[in-house]
Amino acid sequence: MHSFLKTVSVLCFLTLSFFASAQTLPDVKVEDAQGKEISTRSLLTGKPLIISYWSIACKPCIQELNAINDAIEEWREEADFDVVAVSVDDVRMQATAKAKASALGWEFTCIYDANQDLKRAMNVSLTPQSFVVDAEGNIVFSHSGYTPGSEELLFDKVLELSGK
């Protein structure tokens, strides 16, 4: 009986720890593509959100964002969601990052975290790093690295949130 109670106690603790540590999208100031300061919480529009961190020196990051961009029109036929690409390039490279995003024709929101405040707040250490956030701002999925096709994992999570 003692071992059963100990097991139940541990499971309760782990469950509570999981829910207590569930991360939400932090409220951090970043810059939009026009150079205007915005709050990251303003990115929440009541629908799921894919957030993908990138830099101009990260080829897998750009591959992932290009793959998302290639699929986004088809995906949006199945689910209503947003995508945000977060550049972590510093102030010296920010203009280059903006030009790169524009030249690639990405059909989603690009924001610029030159001071890396959002990157730190979300505990991102390496790029590419992607997250799926629910309509309330809760981070429900995280994925590091990129291999062709792994963008589908992000969309699968969006579909789950959409009840599809």
Image (cartoon, grey):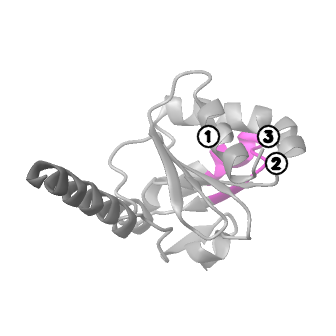
Identify residue type, mark 1: Leu
- Which residue is under mark 1? 154
Compared with residue 9, is residue 154 higher up or lower down, i.e. above or below?
above
Measure how far apart labels 3 and 2 are at the Cα level: 10 Å
Numbered disc in front, either 3 or 1: 1
Q: Whole-percent x and y of residue 126?
A: 36, 43
Q: Residue at x 47, y 35 (%)?
A: 58
Identify residue type, mark 2: Ala
Q: Is residue 79 left or right of residue 83?
A: right
Measure how far apart labels 2 and 1 are at the Cα level: 12 Å
* Residue 33 included in the magenta stretch of the image: no
- Which residue is under mark 2? 79
Identify residue type, mark 3: Ile
63 or 20, which is in the foreground?
Answer: 20
Residue 86, located in which quarter of the rendered image?
bottom right
- Which residue is under mark 3? 72
Q: Which residues are magenta?
A: 98-110
Q: Residue at x 53, y 65 (%)?
A: 138
Compared with residue 60, is residue 55 higher up or lower down, i.e. above or below?
below
